[in-house]
């Protein structure tokens, strides 16, 4: 097995086709199969039951939180539970009002429109969405100049479900039109271990409890990452072992992937090292940091930084990012406190 393949990042936002197929295979279809996010599940159960009793469609909902926690999965579960069709799109794809009109006019009563990365909607498209969400009406401007006319199209009573990793980028008018806002939080190690065992069963893998525990411990408390790690360890166990996933096999696979016991990849450690070695431990602006490590600013903020902050290895200050005493300790370096 070539090292260029095995060292590929398992937390990068870009997914291979095989990863997407894996996620689809492992995705639960019913709410009772969904592990974790208990408070959200309880709220959704009540909302769905009430809507069914009234014979109405669901109200518009917004799921937000880090990538890989199950926002898309919850949208598909709501579709299945409500026996409604779901159409899936994303914010960057809807470039013009006509793109939105094409989707909305092909919906039926009770259908669900799921917009991923909804914070990246074009402003003109977003404004056209307001009357669609509130009054189930779409206003289309026909023509230009003084002869322009507004054509009103009545829409079916659909449900819009939005998903975003950066709720702060949503405008207040859009955010206020959602009836339910739900933040998905990182999972507990026990929940991740349950998810790993469930995925292994679906994939017909033999996994020992200590193997599932090892994968959960390096998953960054994220189900998507846990499932990708499971697949990588499965490959390693099949090629280098007898196919049984245990702690020993998991640790060997993680060593080749350059993942440490805290779930940090090489690029995570590079971020810490760059701040310490090139900028004296910080503070450093996010744009400068992104340029120094050769990553996009959004990827740094959305993918890598949240977990480093969750572990207390870096901190945000008014002047920029700094490596904490825990960060120095993780690198095996002595921390010298200084005023910020």
Image: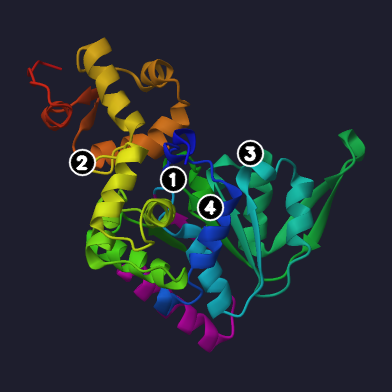
Which of the two labelled residues, at mark 3 and mark 1, occupies the earlier sequence position?
Answer: 3
Mark pair 3, 1: CA separation: 15 Å
Residue contact at pointers 4 and 3, CB within 8 angstroms: no
Foreground residue among 310 and 239: 239
When the figure is inspected, residue 148 is found, relative to residue 116, above or below; the finding is: above
Q: Which mark is residue 167?
A: 1
Q: How many marks?
A: 4
Residue at the far bottom in the pictured view? 53
In terms of depth relative to the viewer, which is nearer, 119 or 323? 323
In whole angstroms, how far apart are the C-alphas of marks 4 and 3? Answer: 32 Å
Report the Cα–Cα distance between label 4 and label 2.
Answer: 27 Å
Earlier in the chain: of badge 2 and badge 3, it is 3
Q: Assess whether residue 59 is covered by the magenta stretch.
A: yes
Badge 1 density bin: few <14, some 14–19, many ≥20, Cα 10 Å: some
Label for residue 19?
A: 4
Q: Which residue is mark 2?
A: 311
Residue indicated by mark 3? 123
- Asked if the residues shown at circle 4 and circle 2 are in contact, with their CB atoms under 8 angstroms apart, the answer is no
- Cβ–Cβ below 8 Å for labels 3 and 1? no
What residue range appears in magenta?
A: 38-65
């Amino acid at each position: 097995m070539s090292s260029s393949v095995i060292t590929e990042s398992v937390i990068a936002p870009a997914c291979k086709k095989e990863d997407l197929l894996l996620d689809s295979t492992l995705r639960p279809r019913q709410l009772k199969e969904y592990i974790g996010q208990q408070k959200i599940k309880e709220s959704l159960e009540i909302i769905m039951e009430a809507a069914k009793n009234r014979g109405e469609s669901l109200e518009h909902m917004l799921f937000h939180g880090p990538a890989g926690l199950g926002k898309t999965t919850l949208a598909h579960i709501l579709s299945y539970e409500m026996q409604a069709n779901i159409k899936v799109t994303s914010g960057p794809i809807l470039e013009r009002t006509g793109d939105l009109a094409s989707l909305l006019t092909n919906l039926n009563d009770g259908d669900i429109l799921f917009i991923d990365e909804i914070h990246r909607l074009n402003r003109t498209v977003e404004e056209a969405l307001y009357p669609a969400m509130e009054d189930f009406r779409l206003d289309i401007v026909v023509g230009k100049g003084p002869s322009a006319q507004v054509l009103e199209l009545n829409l079916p009573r659909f449900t819009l479900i939005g998903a975003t990793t950066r709720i702060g980028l949503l405008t207040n008018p859009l955010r206020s039109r959602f009836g339910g806002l739900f933040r998905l939080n990182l999972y507990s190690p026990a929940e991740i271990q349950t998810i790993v065992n469930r995925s292994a069963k679906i994939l017909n893998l033999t996994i020992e409890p200590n193997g599932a525990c090892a994968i959960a411990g390096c998953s960054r408390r994220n189900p998507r990452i846990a499932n990708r790690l499971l697949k990588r360890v499965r490959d390693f166990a099949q090629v280098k072992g007898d196919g049984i996933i245990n702690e020993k096999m998991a640790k060997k696979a993680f060593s080749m992937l350059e993942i440490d016991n805290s779930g940090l990849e090489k690029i995570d450690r590079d971020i810490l090292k760059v701040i310490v070695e090139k900028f004296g431990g910080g503070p450093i602006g996010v744009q400068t940091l992104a340029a120094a490590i050769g990553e996009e600013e959004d990827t740094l903020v959305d993918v890598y930084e949240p977990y480093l902050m969750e572990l207390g290895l870096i901190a945000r200050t008014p002047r920029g990012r700094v490596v904490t005493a825990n960060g120095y300790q993780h690198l095996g370096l002595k921390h010298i406190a200084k005023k910020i």
